[in-house]
Image (tube, rainbow, N blue to C red):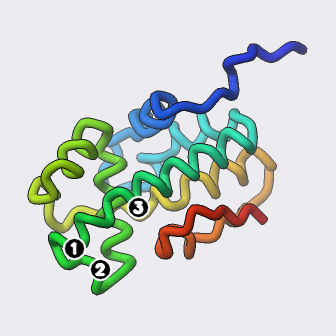
């Protein structure tokens, strides 16, 4: 079988397309919110998933300036989950927060976004769990540990 050349090319446009697959009809059921995006990502190559993960890390790092504005860095898990909610809300909201951190919606977190790549790889490999170190999200390190 011949795969189309563009099937595994990764771009920022593709990143936001996957983020738009988050299904907010399931608010409060975070695993269901990311289910469609996880399934879509699992059909891509491992390299594509790694590229998605790298871009997600970059988007989260870009939002670190907001932590200084809101002093959210005291609890790194809250700060991470707040940044995840900003990315999960989509490109328009993400860009508006980058340009004006006062637009951050208070008490909004979305931790499940940190599991998206892990779950997509696990689904792809047919295993219970594949681990991409969550510590990398906290540290802001550009390195990925796929094991």
Q: Label 2: which residue?
A: 73
Q: Label 1: which residue?
A: 68
**Looking at the image, which residue sits at the far right?**
1
Q: Residue at x 35, y 49 (%)?
A: 87
Using the rendered view, name the quadrant where residue 80 is placed.
bottom left
Q: Residue at x 70, y 66 (%)?
A: 145
Mark 3 vs 1, N-terminal side: 3
**Looking at the image, which residue sits at the far bottom?**
74
Q: Position of residue 72 (x, y in %)?
A: 24, 77
Using the rendered view, name the quadrant where residue 77 is placed.
bottom left
* Callout 1 touching callout 2 (CB < 8 Å): yes
User: Dot 2, crowdedness within 10 Å: few (<14), some or many (≥20)?
Assistant: some
Query: How many discs mark residues in the rendered view?
Result: 3
Badge 2 element:
helix
Using the rendered view, name the quadrant where residue 128 is placed.
bottom right
Q: Nearer the viewer, residue 38 or 14?
A: 14
**Looking at the image, which residue sits at the far left?**
102
Q: Residue at x 60, y 32 (%)?
A: 10
Badge 1 element:
helix
Q: Residue at x 42, y 35 (%)?
A: 16
> Is 81 placed left or right of 104 in the picture?
right
Mark 2 vs 3, N-terminal side: 3
Q: Label 3: which residue?
A: 61
Work out how far the residue at label 1 is from the one at label 2, CA to CA, in angstroms.
7 Å
**Where the C terminus falls, by quadrant?**
bottom right
Work out how far the residue at label 3 is from the one at label 1, CA to CA, in angstroms.
12 Å
């Amino acid at each position: 079988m011949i795969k189309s050349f563009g099937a595994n090319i990764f771009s920022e446009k593709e990143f936001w397309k996957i983020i738009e697959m988050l299904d907010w009809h399931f608010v409060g059921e975070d695993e269901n919110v990311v289910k469609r995006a996880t399934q879509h990502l699992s059909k891509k190559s491992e390299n594509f998933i790694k590229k998605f993960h790298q871009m997600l890390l970059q988007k989260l790092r870009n939002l670190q300036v907001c932590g200084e504005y809101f002093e959210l860095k005291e609890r790194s898990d809250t700060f991470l989950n707040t940044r995840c909610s900003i990315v999960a809300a989509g490109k328009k909201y993400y860009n508006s927060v980058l340009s004006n951190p006062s637009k951050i919606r208070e008490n909004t977190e979305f931790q499940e976004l940190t599991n998206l790549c892990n779950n997509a790889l696990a689904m792809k490999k047919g295993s219970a769990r594949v681990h991409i170190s969550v510590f990398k999200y906290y540290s802001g390190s550009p390195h990925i540990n796929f094991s």
